[in-house]
Image: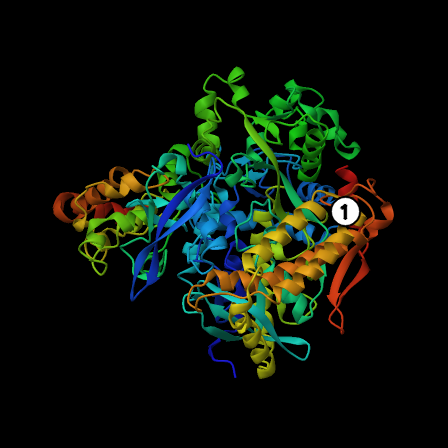
Amino acid sequence: MPGSGDVATFRVWRGDAQGGKLVDYPTRVSPGMVVLDAIHQIQAEQANDLAVRWNCKAGRCGSCSAEVNGAPRLMCMTRLNDLPLDKPVTVEPMRTFPPIKDLVTDVSWNFRVKQQIKKFKPRAPDAPDGTWRMAQSDVDRVQEFRKCIECFLCQDVCHVLRDHHLQDEFVGPRFLVHVAALEMHPLDTEDRVPELRQAHGIGYCNITKCCTKVCPEDIAITDNAIIPLKERVVDEFYDPLGRLLKVFSRGGGP
Amino acid sequence: MTDYETFDHDVLVIGAGGAGLRAAIAASAAGVSVGLVCKSLLGKAHTVMAEGGVAAALANVDDRDNWQVHFADTMRGGQYVNNWRMAELHAKEAPDRVRELEAWGALFDRTEDGRILQRNFGGHKYPRLAHVGDRTGLEMIRTLQDHSIHQGIDVHMECTVLRLLTEGDRIAGAFGYDRERGRFRLFRCKAIVLATGGIGRAYSITSNSWEYTGDGHALAYHAGAALQDMEFVQFHPTGMIWPPSVRGILVTEGVRGEGGVLLNKDGRRFMFDDIPENYRSQTADNEEEGWRYTQGDKSARRPPELLTRDHVARCIVREVREGRGSPHGGVILDISWIKRKLPDARKHIMRKLPSMYHQFKQLADIDITTTPMEVGPTTHYIMGGVRVDGDTQMSTLPGLFAAGECAAGLHGANRLGGNSLSDLLVFGKRAGDFAARFARDHGSAPIDSAQVDEAGRGALAPFERAAAANGHGPYQVMQELQGMMQELVGIVRVGSEMERALAGVEELRKRARQVGVAGNREYNPGWHTALDLDNLLTISEAIARAAVERKESRGGHFRDDYPEKDAAYGKFNIVIRRGKDGTMQLSHELIPELPAELKRVLEEQK
């Protein structure tokens, strides 16, 4: 645990789309500090133009994603206590996204992907006053997915995006979680399964669970979102009897 | 000549938290073209930090609740200097706005019979806050965000507006810059909705993020619109205080709503020692009754921990000043004690307060299910803001609207928890609706290129001073301002200290004009901070001037030299305008008399 008056070195990536390098900044550290505090201190005292995104500083907004000693983390939730301070702490931008400047990357692709996913479409209200009835147990499952803070660390670590650059064919774990939240929403009536197989490229995921491991909200991305969606794709496209039954039930049901 | 790119929108919404998103959705649904400016990325605004819930008299948990009770609670909490028309509309329309979110996909926690669950909160007579654990704000902003992206709204992310452009006495557009490239943008529009949130960054201890620099307040003021109630700043009683790096981060009132108690170092529940007269009949007089209230016993009255935020914050300050504080200068907030009452307390706490559990576990190494927390007041919210018409949310400048935290009126002298999320829905929608109507009824106004050039030159000036920046770095000036406001215009105020703060603002303003920045225009936070200074100085001056002027104590404004409430001050709002000579002018604007119907409601709910 760092005591007050101690100094640690932060090796921060400085640069832009043209390239960059790691620069060492020694700075004071004190008990309870997180990586974002150190970055802010460096910014205020040594490098006013050091670019970094942040907002809430409490792990709620998902803005300060970066790679700390090579691991995708929220800087605001990474305590210095948990890092070896006898050697420099490396802080780099998320490598899957194009660099803009220093620790800030171009994450706009994520916003474009989301727009392509069919929006929520509720069933008709259950009660005459226009409201619905849902049991807490039905809501629980989807609430897990709706905890997502869109930090995009799962996208950053996914090898389909990071190493194979298949951004045009695969939406990535974040948006499979988003689709799962919509598909498993008790009120939703839209069918997104055909897109899952085609446009969203769910088949690219080979369930290595890297995304689950880095999720700061502890969403069981692979087990609870992606695998059930994969099962739905299989049911719909590779099970003719099930598909037929579904067509009938859709025609007759509410 | 200033170089810029031009964008045309019928309605420009500045700010993309809950109020801005709701306004943009309303305006685009009304059929006009809408531009939405976000200071950060879409979906990151401070609304995500709202924890406890959204107040609406749905009466799902207690059928005695209705708009009249909500209205009366809001007025009582605001110490009757509220814009009563806004309080009325808010109480009446909040239930529909919440139900509408459900139709857009929001998933609130449920009652046994499958309806939206509601929880207790400070100052609300009945359980009224629809919620999702303690991450209600995230649920709301994501619902609004995901709905808005299919509405054809043009979103300008990471873009900051530096100046509103006027023509004669109406709005004509806005001028700003995009952070990624550092290039200027000119927005030509027929109406503008300000939804920029608060001013927390004027103080050193705050729950607010870097964005909350009073942009909307200052933009409106410089464009000639009036501000009001700027003396009323809410210091949330429970922020984290240890370790130092997390100081100010919010600890939701939901902790107390679920049975958490406040203790001083002697283990005494000090909130029982000071219950204000106008809340006495609604407040439990023993610990057992307070506990029963938090567990849904309708015959019980609420525990004093759930008195209004202004009062709880002052009681905490008193305990600390009189030497009964916790080791790090706060008091104890304990939810772990409920294990003596509930067999599955640990599970219950983790289910009801999951974000709080994680926040303390990760940032302070504290397990709140077994260990008490240390908390102290943190700058959280400003009740004051742009003076608006209650129905339309239009400011005193035609074509300029404001909604959410940057607008004044609904909350009076003190906001009740949960009323901000309902505020931004109700008045975000109204502002969007009426801005769209204004845009349809009025053509574009011409852009005054002199205003654009002046704004452009002013924005670039810090780069020209880079060499002479000795001791005038933007961060140093900002930190000094924050420290000064914290010390001199904080929770407990004295006239002479605030006069010193006003002199300090003048001094810092001179230094801000010398601030130089290094580097180039691309994503340069130093430059951004330099540009934020002007807004921060403007609103700090407004807060201090209004606070000097109000020689009484009311709601969020407490004067050690005038500790009592003075009925004469309950008859008006303090309004601030920019004088012709550029100085800040204060006036007292009488609060219109309540209509007989609303008077009756207040009487019945006494």
Left or right of A12 on screen, residue B488: right
**Residue B406 position within the rendered picture, expressed as x and y whole percent measured from the top left:** 62, 57
Residue with the mark numbered 1:
B80
Left or right of A167 on screen, residue B159: right
Q: Is residue B580 above or below residue B474?
A: below
Query: Which picture quadrant has residue A109?
Result: bottom left
Q: Is residue A14 above or below residue B446?
A: above
Q: Nearer the viewer, residue A89 or A157?
A: A89
Left or right of B584 on screen, residue B177: left
Residue visible at 48% across and 44% down in the picture: A131
- Toward the right, the furthest residue is B568
**Residue B172 position within the rendered picture, expressed as x and y whole percent measured from the top left:** 59, 77
Chain identifier of the residue bearing label 1 in the image: B
Q: Is residue B184 visible?
A: yes
Q: Is residue A107 visible?
A: no
Secondary structure beneath label 1: loop
Residue visible at 73% across and 71% down in the picture: B582
* Colouring style: rainbow
Disc 1 residue type (three-letter): Tyr
